[in-house]
Image (cartoon, grey):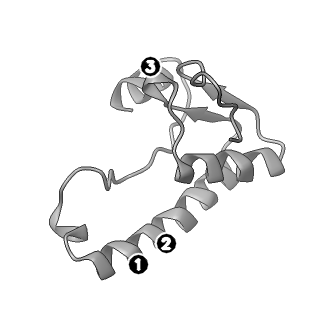
Amino acid sequence: MNEANFYETAAGRIVLAPGCNMKQPHPLWEDPDRADRLKQQLDELHRRKIDLADEILIVNPGGYIGESTRSEIDYASSLGKPIRYTHPVGAGEDARG
């Protein structure tokens, strides 16, 4: 994601990227209850970032799109936002599942 951020910024685009990667260990989400609350807050924050965006770039190494990203794609689509991908969507998948 950092690499995509570099290229998009170098291309003159303002990047609104996720601020946390909850797949990496961190004290903020060690506690499962706290992690659940934070996940809900981040999901809402990501929707607000989508509201502000002119287009959406899905950073999907290997073509994988998880449930959370799929939900964000659906939200962006419902707003008519253009969506680009860093990699082709995995075999047997489409952008919306």
Pointer 1 with pointer 2, Cβ within 8 A = yes
Please give left or right for residue 86 compared with residue 97 in the image.
Answer: left
Q: CA distance from mark 3 to mark 2?
A: 29 Å
Toward the front, the furthest residue is 92
Assign the N terminus to one quadrant of the image. Answer: top left
- Marks 3 and 2: CB-CB under 8 Å? no
Q: Residue at x 54, y 38 (%)?
A: 65
Element under disc 3: helix
Q: Are marks 1 and 3 in contact (CB under 8 Å)?
A: no
Earlier sequence position, callout 3 versus callout 2:
3
The quarter of the picture where residue 33 lies is: bottom left
Residue type marked 2: Gln
Please identify the quarter of the rendering in which residue 25 is found.
bottom left
Disc number at residue 7?
3
Q: Position of residue 3 (x, y in %)?
A: 36, 24
Identified by mark 3, the residue type is: Tyr
Q: Position of residue 76 (x, y in %)?
A: 73, 47
Q: Gap in Å between the C-alphas at discs 1 and 3?
A: 32 Å
| Nearer-the-camera pick, 10 or 79 | 79
The percent coordinates of residue 6 (x first, y second) are 39, 24
Q: Which residue corresponds to mark 1?
A: 37
Q: For this view, does 13 lie left or right of residue 35?
A: right
The relative height of residue 48 versus residue 8 in the rendered view (above or below) is below
User: How dense is the environment of label 1, judged by Cα within 10 Å: few (below 14), some, or many (20 and up)?
Assistant: few
Residue 66, above or below 60: below
Q: Indicate the position of residue 70 as horizontal and vertical percent values.
A: 62, 46
* Residue at image coords 64%, 53%: 71
Residue mark closest to the camera, 1 vs 3:
1
Circle 2 is placed at which residue position? 40
